[in-house]
Amino acid sequence: MRKASPQAQPFGSPYEAAVEFLASRPRSVGEIRRHLRAKRYDDEAIDGAVDKLRAQRYVDDLDFAKYWVEQRSRFRPKGDRALVSELTSKGVARETIDAALGDLPAESEGDRARRAIARQLRRWESLEPRERKRKIHAFLAARGFGYDVIDEVIARPSVEAEADI
């Protein structure tokens, strides 16, 4: 088995590699660039592929950011800080992130936090109030919710369960 030399040229076009990368889910321009660099395409070829993808509307950072925020809100609620961090790591500009967060549904960050802990609250019912507060705080902080939101949730964890925390 021969190892490819560091100078080895990638097989196929960068455009085809990018389209294949986009097949599983939408991607940001930054993710596509990183992926193509990892496949050792040169910057000029990468720029051409990204321009072609943009022209065909296959890639748009604002649409990607809205998709990401909506998916997170629906399936694994996270706080605004965590969403900003995730999208920044994917190469999305801060202005684009702010626009995507501004398009969130009317649900408040507190409502998202309550949905995030709903399953855990059932598991923590038997804990002492002090330990339950600590668990809620740690869980929500790890999910990127701000302290004001966490305090709001601890004061009133859910509409259904007016539990005395």
Image (tube, rainbow, N blue to C red):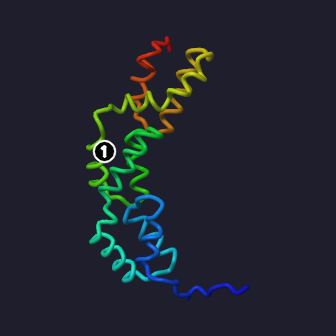
Q: Quadrant of residue 131?
A: top right
Q: Residues within 10 Å of mark 1 (few under 14, many from 20)?
A: some
Q: Residue at x 40, y 46 (%)?
A: 83
Total residue callouts: 1
Q: Residue at x 54, y 28 (%)?
A: 119
Q: Is residue 165 above or below residue 19?
A: above
- Front in this rendered view, residue 16 or 146: 16
Q: Quadrant of residue 124?
A: top right
Find residue 86 and report its horizontal and vertical position in percent: 43, 51
Is residue 78 positioned above or below 4 on the image? above
Secondary structure of the residue carrying numbered label 1: helix
For the N terminus, the image quarter is: bottom right
Task: Name the residue: 38% across, 28% down.
Answer: 111
- Tell me if 69 is positioned left or right of 118 in this view: left
Q: Which residue is mark 1?
A: 101
Percent across and percent down for residue 156 are 42, 18
x and y, in percent, of residue 117 in the image: 50, 29
Q: Amino acid at mark 1?
A: Leu
| Residue closer to the observer: 38 or 131 | 38
Residue 136, percent from left and from top: 52, 26
